[in-house]
Amino acid sequence: SGAGSSATVPVQGVSKLEYLNVDTYTKCKEIADSRNKGLVIPDLATWRRLRAEGGGKLDIDFPAAPAGQQWARRVWASDGGLLTRKCYYPDNDTDKDLSDIKIGGEVAYGFALKP
């Protein structure tokens, strides 16, 4: 490909992401642990590094929401407090606290990094 062409090249880090589920952080973490592959849900610093490595954008292959549902394009980060976890919005590089409780907890896309 020449200098003027544009091709989508998978970012090194993004290719190492494994999709878990759309659920609470705790549930996504349980799924990651159950796969026994050393999967780790990234912290905010790691998400931001992956985005920077991608030239300021992070192309995540978000699975589609079921018909009639709209899911925010946000991913779990491992940073958190007592009953909250951070979620990260890769499209605009922002984060937010979400409640992480079994019943009525907020959901985000769970992705884990393969070691």
Image (cartoon, grey):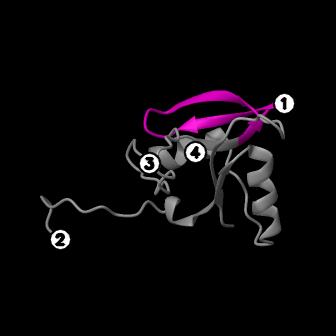
Q: Residue at x 40, y 44 (%)?
A: 57
The residue under label 3 is 58
- In the image, the segment drawn in magenta is 78-99
Q: Which residue lies most toward the right here?
A: 82
Q: Which residue is mark 1?
A: 83
Residue 30's place in the image compared with 96, above or below, is below
Structural distance between the alpha carbons of marks 3 and 4: 9 Å
3D distance between C-alphas at marks 2 and 4: 29 Å
**Which of the two discs, 1 and 2, sits closer to the camera?**
1
Please identify the quadrant where the N terminus is shown: bottom left
- Mark 2 lies on a secondary structure that is loop
Instruction: Return the disc, 3 or 4, that comes first in the chain's sequence.
Output: 4
Residue of label 4: 47
Q: Which residue is mark 2?
A: 1
Based on the picture, tell me whether residue 52 belongs to the magenta stretch.
Answer: no
* Amino acid bearing label 3: Leu
What amino acid is at disc 4? Trp
